[in-house]
Image: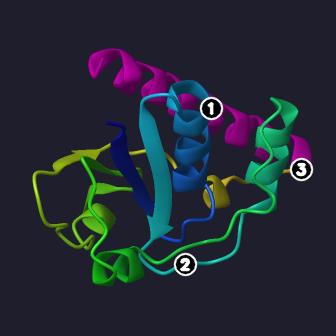
């Protein structure tokens, strides 16, 4: 049976979207990945661009509310917050035996500078998230 993993960040516009995409891409045989936000926003276009550079298209993804998933009674084996600890503490507690993890990554929307400089920062965050997802898969085999 596949493990169900929910990635949560503030707006479900960047970090959680990347984590969901990487787990689906790298561990799709063993995992069902979803993502949601505390206050869903719009996909970050820099993140969409950074993911397209490595062959993953998230441009059509919706942003979701973690509270809607909670109200629907969705169950997960893992709930992983990818925002800062203070924001992660606002996430609802899902029922059942759920492992909660916090992976704190810089928010891509805080990237500054020219487009090229922002993209360098977003690529760095993207690559950190990919490495963390790969470690998660290895640790849970």
Q: Is residue 103 left or right of residue 24?
A: left
In the rendered image, the quadrant that contains the C terminus is top left
Label 1 close to label 3 by CB (< 8 Å): no
Q: Is residue 28 left or right of residue 121?
A: left
The kind of secondary structure element at disc 3 is helix
Q: Nearer the viewer, mark 2 or mark 1?
A: 1
Circle 2 sits on which residue? Answer: 40
Q: Nearer the viewer, residue 103 or 80?
A: 80
* Residue 127 included in the magenta stretch of the image: yes
Q: Nearer the viewer, residue 85 or 65?
A: 65
Q: Earlier in the sequence, mark 2 or mark 1?
A: 1
The secondary structure that most of the magenta stretch takes on is: helix
Q: Nearer the viewer, mark 1 or mark 3?
A: 1
| Residue 129 x/y as whole percent | 52, 34
From what the image shows, is residue 29 above or below residue 38? Answer: above
* Residue 62 included in the magenta stretch of the image: no
Tell me the number on the disc at residue 115: 3
For disc 1, the neighbor class at 10 Å (few under 14, some 14 to 19, many from 20) is few
| Residue 94 x/y as whole percent | 19, 66
For disc 2, the neighbor class at 10 Å (few under 14, some 14 to 19, many from 20) is some
């Amino acid at each position: 049976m596949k493990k169900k993993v929910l990635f949560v960040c503030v707006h479900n516009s960047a970090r959680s979207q990347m984590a969901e995409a990487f787990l689906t891409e790298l561990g799709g045989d063993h995992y069902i990945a979803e993502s949601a936000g505390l206050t869903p926003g719009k996909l970050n276009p820099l993140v969409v661009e950074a993911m397209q550079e490595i062959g993953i298209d998230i441009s059509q993804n919706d942003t979701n509310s973690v509270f809607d998933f909670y109200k629907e009674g969705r169950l997960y084996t893992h709930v992983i917050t990818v925002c800062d600890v203070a924001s992660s503490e606002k996430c609802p507690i899902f029922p059942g035996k759920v492992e909660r993890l916090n992976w704190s990554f810089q928010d891509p929307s805080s990237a500054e500078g020219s487009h090229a400089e922002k993209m360098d920062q977003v690529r760095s965050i993207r690559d950190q998230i990919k490495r963390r997802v790969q470690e998660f898969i290895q640790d849970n085999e």
